[in-house]
Image (cartoon, rainbow, N blue to C red):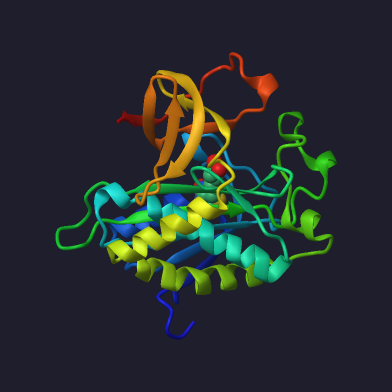
């Protein structure tokens, strides 16, 4: 891909996890821009320690190595730009316009999940090498074909681009478009104005903003109304006891009938203002 930093695309038949593969490559000195794609993952990783499952050859399972030159506090935006680029590609290739659920899920218009993002940072690597972050994304392209393909716990909660578009969608085209859209977005992260523009795009496309939410943290949960996204990509939530900024956590969009106790999930960081 001339003029694009994502020229080294490694298409793997089978791997445990493309994130794990690229983190190892990063430790060994691989440069920014290496992309790992897998037909199949034997131990695909999801957020909060969950598994990410997909049948062989059906979905886009890829990870991208970035060596960001941006403040640590803004690192969340690395996942954001990958999610924004994936949304652009879904529109261009399948005619499907996803909405965002904070932090970086892509949803179909009816709220079913189309894609998820998992960023993993390397421990300080070799001296002289910039720190690395591997951003992995799984996009449901051909699977699930319908609810009948899903395990009971995912029925009504996951969909695919092919299902939404009503026709087959190619993983290869989706990846190519994603990387074209990602190139200028990664460049934009190098300046405060560019970071603000990327955060603004997330803000405008994010169904979480304006929603009643339950924020699930390692040590419990709280309810509130999501009122915005900061320029670092963090979620701002208004609660009866004040405004809180969520750096990392799991979000449930609440409907009125659901505003009662739900089991809390692990993970999450929050600051109060
Ligand atoms: C989520 O839980 O929503 C995030 C899922 C991220 C899955 C992708 S698939 C490619 C990459 N490799 C992994 O092991 N996980 C990510």
Comparing 120 with 159, the one in front is 159
- The residue sitting at 47% across, 38% down in the picture is 227
Q: Residue at x 26, y 59 (%)?
A: 70
Return the residue found at the far left. Answer: 127
Which quadrant of the figure contains the C terminus? top left
The image quarter containing residue 25 is: bottom left
* 113 sits to left or right of 221: right
Give whichever of 48, 206 is nearer the camera.
Answer: 206
Q: How many marks?
A: 0
Q: Quadrant of residue 148?
A: top right
Q: Nearer the viewer, residue 96 or 259?
A: 259
Choose top left, top right, bottom left or bottom right for residue 131. Answer: bottom left
Residue positioned most to the bottom? 2
Q: Position of residue 158 (x, y in %)?
A: 71, 42
Asked if one can make out residue 246 in the rendered structure from this viewpoint, the answer is yes
* Residue 71 percent across, percent down from the top left: 24, 54
Query: Where residue 128 sits: x, y (%)?
Result: 15, 63
Estimate the x, y position of residue 164 in percent, counting from the top left.
Answer: 78, 55
Above-or-below relation of 240 to 181: above
Which residue is rendered at x = 35% and y = 54% of the image? Answer: 133
Residue 43 visible in rendering: no
> Measured along the vertical axis of the image, is residue 58 above or below residue 120?
below
Q: Give the left or right position of residue 93, taking residue 67 as reference.
A: right
Q: Residue at x 39, y 19 (%)?
A: 241
């Amino acid at each position: 891909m001339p003029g694009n930093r994502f020229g080294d695309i490694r298409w793997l038949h089978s791997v445990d996890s493309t994130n794990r593969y690229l983190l190892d490559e990063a430790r060994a000195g691989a440069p920014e821009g290496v992309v790992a794609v897998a037909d199949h993952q034997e131990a695909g990783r999801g957020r909060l320690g969950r598994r990410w499952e997909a049948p062989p050859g059906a979905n886009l399972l890829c990870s991208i190595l970035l060596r960001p030159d941006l403040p640590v506090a803004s690192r969340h935006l690395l996942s954001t730009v990958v999610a924004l680029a994936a949304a652009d590609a879904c529109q261009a290739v399948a005619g499907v316009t996803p909405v965002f659920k904070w932090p970086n899920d892509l949803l179909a218009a009816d709220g079913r999940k189309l894609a998820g993002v998992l960023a993993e940072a390397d421990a300080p690597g070799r001296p002289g090498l910039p720190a690395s972050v591997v951003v992995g994304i799984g996009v449901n392209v051909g699977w699930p074909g319908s609810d009948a393909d899903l395990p009971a716990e995912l029925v009504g909660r996951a969909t695919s681009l092919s299902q939404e578009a009503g026709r087959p969608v190619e993983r290869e085209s989706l990846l190519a478009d994603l990387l074209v859209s990602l190139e200028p977005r990664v460049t934009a992260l190098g300046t405060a104005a560019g970071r603000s523009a990327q955060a603004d795009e997330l803000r405008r496309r994010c169904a979480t903003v304006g929603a009643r939410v339950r924020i699930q943290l390692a040590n419990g949960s709280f309810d509130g109304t999501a009122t915005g996204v900061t320029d670092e990509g963090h979620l701002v939530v208004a609660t009866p006891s004040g405004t809180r900024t969520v750096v990392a956590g799991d979000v449930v969009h609440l409907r009125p009938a659901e505003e009662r106790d739900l089991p809390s999930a692990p993970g999450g960081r929050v600051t109060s203002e």
